[in-house]
Amino acid sequence: MAEKKRLKDLTVWQKAYIPEIAKGLALTLKTMFKPKFTMEYPEVKFLPPSSYRGRPVLVEEAGGEERCVACGLCARVCPALAIEVQAAETEREKERYPERFEINMLRCIFCGFCEEVCPEEAIVMSKDYEMVFNNREDAIYGKDKLLVSVSQLQDRINFLRSHK
Amino acid sequence: MLIDFILIPLVKILIIVVLMLLTVSYSVYFERKISAWAQNRIGPNRVGPAGIFQPFADVFKLLFKEDIVPKVANKPLHTLAPILALFVAFTTYAVIPIGPPVEIFGKMINLAVVDVNSGVLLVLALTSLGVYAITFSGWSSGSKYSLLGGVRSSAQMISYEISMGFSVAGVLIFAESLRPSDIISSQSGWMWNAVLQPIGFLTFLTASFAETNRLPFDLPEAEPELVGGYHTEYSSMKFAGFFLAEYANMIIASAMIVMLYLGGWQVPYIETLGLSAGLQASLQIAAFFVKIGALLFFFIWVRWSIPRFRYDQLMDLGWKVMFPLSLLNLVWAAILAMIMN
Amino acid sequence: MPKFTLDGNEIEFKPGETIIEAAKKVGVDIPHFCWHPSLSVSGNCRVCLVEIEKMPKLAIACSTTASEGMVVHSQSEKTLSARNAVMEFLLINHPLDCPICDEAGECKLQDYAYQHSKGESRFTEEKVHKDKRVPLGPNVMFDGERCISCSRCIRFADEITKTGELTFVQRGDRVTIVTFPGKEFDNAYSLNVTDICPVGALTNRDFRFKARVWDMSATKTICSGCARGCNIEVWVRNNEILRLTPSQNDAVNSFWMCDYGRLETFKQVHSNERINGVYMKREGQDVKVSWDEAYANAASELKHLNKDQIAVIASASSTCEDNFMLAKFAKSVLSTKHVDYIPHVVPGSGDDLLIREDKSPNAFGTELAGVHPAAGGLNRDAILDGVKKGTIKALIVVDEDLAAMSPEMETALAKLDVLIAVSTHHNRTTALANIIFPSATYAEKNGTWVNFQGRIQRIRPAVTTLEADRTLDNLAQSRLDKFGTEYDRWGRSVKLDARPVWKIFAGLSTAFGNKMKYTTAEDVLIDMGKSIDAFKKLDYEKIGEQGVQLELSAKVKA
């Protein structure tokens, strides 16, 4: 950072103000002709890296079943109270499954704590950043919207494993 | 008679108004574009190719917005203020000639709506009226932010009008007339007032920035401190009125600078090229618009380069720097006029 | 009293006490799995090993009796490393399925693993696999892999219920728990083993996977199942009761409660038959009206009746406060002498552990609060007779389904001029009532119950009604209760429009022009203490967590 200057520290040239204005104008003029970095969304889409924390999703195994065992740790750790889980019993080997799993996307702050705390690697942050809803009810994502097959999430899962 | 006094002025008014509205809306567009470029962005690019229809989209949006009037507002004045602002901005344009007199269908037509012999005074008087619009809006909104904006505006305008007036005086010494066309013709060749009286040019330019409330003199608006200043409590088309008036004022100021200091529609030594009268006139008109365009660009460019003054700095500059400088310029102009005569 | 030194502090003990008992009294918790204060000592988990000076080896604190001058170290290096070793052994075959296990959050093994374990296992071999999800009985589910073989459940069945259904089979790391052949673990107290099981091996089949422990709030209150008045905790999430667990009160229920009380008493609180809002009969239809309208109507209908034609039937499930207010209303506002309640005694249904024959939680308290016929008044049988004969024209009935007693009774009730039912649920009597006031259940109100021993105990609201507020009325709050908004699905819990009985009769009394100046149930209790000796100088603070034995005069005892 530039050193802070008081009025008394300025030279006469600087006090005259006009040359300094000219310098400023020159800078902005120069900038006007520099190449722009704007990404023209939605024509050009941002492809997030695997470290990106997008919409949290539930991992769906190849068999179409969720990995989640509804332990409720994500709901407990969620600082925004966005997650609600209702467990129920199932005949599967893992006795427990989420009968209802809801994330209120209006509450979610994309901190990724749920992903970090999940003992089953069942909830991960996807690369999806396009979320649109017209009312508060639609913003509550249920299992139908949350389940994403494991093959689509491999990138993130590998990232998580490499940073354990 | 009918043609001379009614039809021709009416056509002129129509042309000027349409021209003004278009220029105003496109200066908004360019403002946004230039600001974007200066900040390494692209700027509006959604409405039409490269966003060229953005001004229309903006206008439609503003038209469809709800007009909100604060409960405690003084309704007549609250409504009057934006109308006054627009009226002043557009009326001023009547006296500014955009080119030399041309002959159309055998009639000599003056390329100003009216060429009055006290044109410069009229402009100064009308632009001063603009301060009422801002003061009214500030007072009638019933909001402390608006009021502060209005008060600041009147103080600022009064302060800078003085240096503006004295700068103009320097020009008048050379033109020996208040008539715009005379002022322009007094600057033939390279005898532009900007060259002869650089100090006057500088003070007038600065004062124009202050009079149009453009950055670095936009204290009446001052978003960070006053929310939106005098137009905080305005919405919909009333807000658009102020918005358009600001840009119209910018165009007036540019036109005034061109007229007073940059030789108006004159192009140096164009007569020596031996062009036909029509072509020469068109080139001169084009030159006028190019000059205005360059100044508008300058206005915008300065806005996105220089931060706002503090209020005391503004007053210091106005009274302790600009006013003495304009006086100095008056003396200089007088001496110069004596020598040249 | 003799003394010994524990971690540098001298502590007193009673001769015969073990180290763990003496330590517990001064608030030092020596880790333990198999030891339970009310079960015999088995000493098989070994986690309570402590270092005792001049003893050659570490000793288990649960079976070593304290003696004068003993110097015990529960935090020494040797003790801690022994504890770590024991934890490591216990965790060798314990599955890492805390995310699935219901015990997580209230699991002793989990807690001690945090406190006393290294956090990693050196055991890389395959864990022993045992039977999972074995139903031991109708209510209890067993998971063999999670069991750490502490034998608490076996000792419970042997010593507390004396039914002895459970036993260990196999040896070494294959040891597991089964019921004896041909037997089922179905005694009346079977679910207590899910409370004493230090891990998630025994779980409540009714509550399995319903909620996480940390998502619920727990409210200490009293079981409504019988006159025993077992101390319980009510576990609530989203304003819904999910389970009941017993809480310790040595004078009443020790650590236990019966399965009936645990499973059957709370479901009625959320039944679909609950009455929501005040109803009045208009042209044969029940129409929802406002409280004030119903009060005014009830008052105007009762006012022009002869006071000898009005009778009041109270409930032994209501609190003392409710019944005191009701008796006061009947005797001073209605001026009727016919006030009584109907007892619910099922002969032969009791046992000598906890379950009582009297199924009402507050029959004793109801009588103490003044619900009995005034001199010359009709008692319960006479009132019911009067209804049948038609000499009683108006009846106020609180939480009793009189119409279900007999068809004859039902027709008699239908013929009454005025039938005002104060009830928690819709039933055949409310179907006949002119006015129905919705009353709050035991889980929705403050109050006191007097159990069969004459012990007065507090009930506390765990579920909110429309007029109550979790924060303002000091109800237990879970995490979600503190932060929910109406836009969160979990914030939209069902709240019924119901009031405690005492409040309903205070309102009715006001409608009669007889204002009662009570704002809380405690006010009623304090007022009650002024006129009834048994309740003298009592308030809720005095009753406290464990209740107070009432001082009863000889006359009342008889």
Image: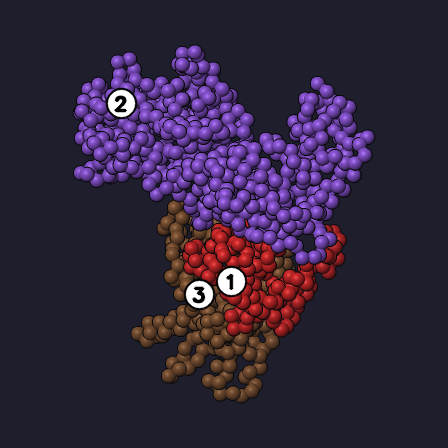
Q: Nearer the viewer, residue C325 or A126?
A: C325
Tag 2 subunit: C
Report the Cα–Cα distance between label 3 and label 2: 85 Å
User: Hey, which residue is sitting farthest top in the picture?
Assistant: C554
Q: Quadrant of the C terminus of chain C?
A: top left
Instruction: Tell me the shade of chain C.
Output: purple
Q: Quadrant of residue B241?
A: bottom left
The reply to whether the C-beta atoms of the residues labelled 1 and 2 are less than 8 Å apart is no
Q: Position of residue B52 (x, y in %)?
A: 47, 73
Q: Is residue A18 above or below residue C422?
A: below
Q: Are marks 3 and 1 on the same chain?
A: no
Q: Classify mark 1: helix, strand or loop.
A: loop
Q: Amino acid at mark 3?
A: Asp
Q: Is residue B217 above or below residue C142?
A: below
* Neighbour tally class for label 3: few under 14, some 14-19, many 20 plus, Cα within 10 Å: some
Q: Is residue C82 above or below residue B182?
A: above
Tell me the residue that label 3 is attached to. B58
Q: Nearer the viewer, residue C104 or B16?
A: C104
In the image, what residue occupies the spot 55% across and 56% down? A94
Q: Position of residue A108 (x, y in %)?
A: 53, 54
Which chain, by letter, is red? A
